[in-house]
Amino acid sequence: MAQGPSLFETAVQQFERAADVIKLTPYVREILRHPKNEVVVNFPVLLDNGQYKVFTGYRIQHNNVLGPFKGGIRYHPAVNTDEVRALAAWMTFKTALSGLPLGGAKGGVAVDPKAFSENEVTRITRRFTAALGSNIGPEHDIPAPDVGTNARTMVLMMDTYMNSQATATKQASWGVVTGKSLTCGGSEGREKATGQGVQITLENIAKDQKIELSSCTFSMQGFGNVGSWGSVLIAERGAKLLAVQDHTGSIRNVKGIDANALMEYAKKTGGIKGYPEADSCTAEEFWKTKVDVLVPGAFENQITEKNVDWIDAKIIAEGANGPITAAADKVLNERGVTIIPDVLCNAGGVIVSYFEWIQNKRSEHWDLDEVDERLKKLLTRACASVKKESKRLKCDLRTAAYAVGLQRIEAAYVERGIFP
Ligand code: NAD
């Protein structure tokens, strides 16, 4: 996952491209080139065999000029400073583009959660949260799930954080994390929100290319939270899923793959490999599958100079963060492929996380229709601003998306000034 070019450099190059186009105030550019705070913690955890192992965890807070830091927690063996920095910076631009009163952060632990028992992962989560201490908080920095973490991880983080607070302020801590279970303060619709955002932004942008979801084909890389929900919701609009890839392998069926049935199968078996209603294929065959829409929904640096020429798609919808390297991005732009950038395409997750945070603050519970309606409204507004900037500045959608976010961040800095 961390192989390839420096991810943080990629993130900086992306925002600098937009900064050049909009002639961003120089000191704002200089500030955004650096994360504001970087917390690294080494913490011991008791294993089931009675031994102790020390794990390394990260929380990098990129920017909070528009509101509290916000961003996911990743559990993966390749988690490292460069990756977390990049993911934190992308959160800053994503929340700004979506018009949320939030900043950007990201965190993680270098661990393969599948290699440890449930009890061990529970202890890792609790001890990591304790080690982060007051570096997170409901009005300061609010984590959420990402690769390798889920609603259970968030509930454990919340419970650990709450139990470290003074008795009288415990109940003010529900919103310290989002992406929690419904029983423990989560929001309706949070689990599917990122995939739903991919579907909403894709439908919106595809229409401009005269592509209707009801008659198009697509392929999906990654079949976890984003990939499985994205597949189910895009297929619900009538699109045909032709190929899927996850860490267990690649599958293909020109007649179409039933996304709901594959979701059930993957939940039961831990991956898509062996799904009986499709043929297994090689990774190369997966990338070469001719489709209208390709959704990379797994990890960063997946579309590179090595496989970019294999891709035969009109639109690439970035469900994952940073799935296309800078070199491959250039090739695809020159070929006229429309790329829906991650900061827009996968913003559905952080938007519904924001809704969860508000509900926690107000002790409210919104029904699913309300969440869905509000999500659609915010994403439609974000798509409209990106398209407008893309026309005005005569640039690709990624540069336009950064331009929208950067101008909001710039306005706040210029008005507030720099202390002291
Ligand atoms: P997840 O852990 O639920 O799923 C990850 C998927 O990637 C799994 O299906 C796994 O099999 C697959 N994968 C792993 N290694 C692979 C490989 N070598 N080749 C192909 N597939 C591989 O994670 P997720 O939450 O779905 O996140 C996926 C991406 O979306 C990440 O880039 C994440 O940062 C981004 N994202 C997630 C959210 C969210 O709400 N979960 C929000 C915004 C962005």
Image (cartoon, rainbow, N blue to C red):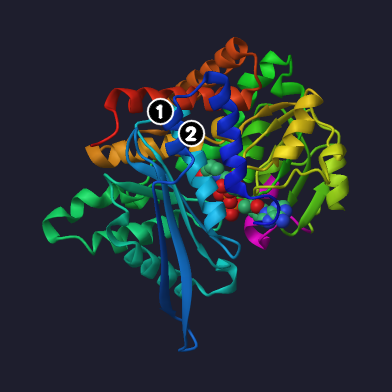
Q: Secondary structure at mark 2?
A: helix
Q: Is residue 266 magenta?
A: yes
Residue 351 x, y percent position in the rendering: 44, 34
The residue lying toward the viewer, choosing from 225 and 92, is 92
Residue 394 at x, y percent in the picture: 64, 13
* Highlighted magenta segment, given as a residue range: 261-273
The N terminus, quarter of image: bottom right
Sequence-wise, which precedes: disc 2 or disc 1?
A: 2
Question: Is disc 2 in contact with disc 1, using a CB cutoff of under 8 Å?
Answer: no
Kind of residue indicated by mark 2: Phe
Secondary structure character of the magenta stretch overall: helix
> Relative to 308, is 46 on the left or the right?
left
Viewed as shown, does residue 55 lie left or right of 103?
A: right
Can residue 147 be seen here? Answer: yes
User: Which residue sits at x=56%, y=36%?
Assistant: 346
Q: Which mark is residue 211?
A: none
Q: Which residue is mark 2?
A: 93
Q: Position of residue 269 (x, y in %)?
A: 68, 62
Q: Which amino acid type is marked by label 1?
A: Ile
Query: Does 310 sit above or below residue 84?
Result: above
327 sits to left or right of 134? right
**In 3D space, how far apart are the residues under numbered discs 2 and 1 (Cα atoms)?**
9 Å
Please tell me whether residue 129 is drawn above or below residue 379 in the rendered image: below
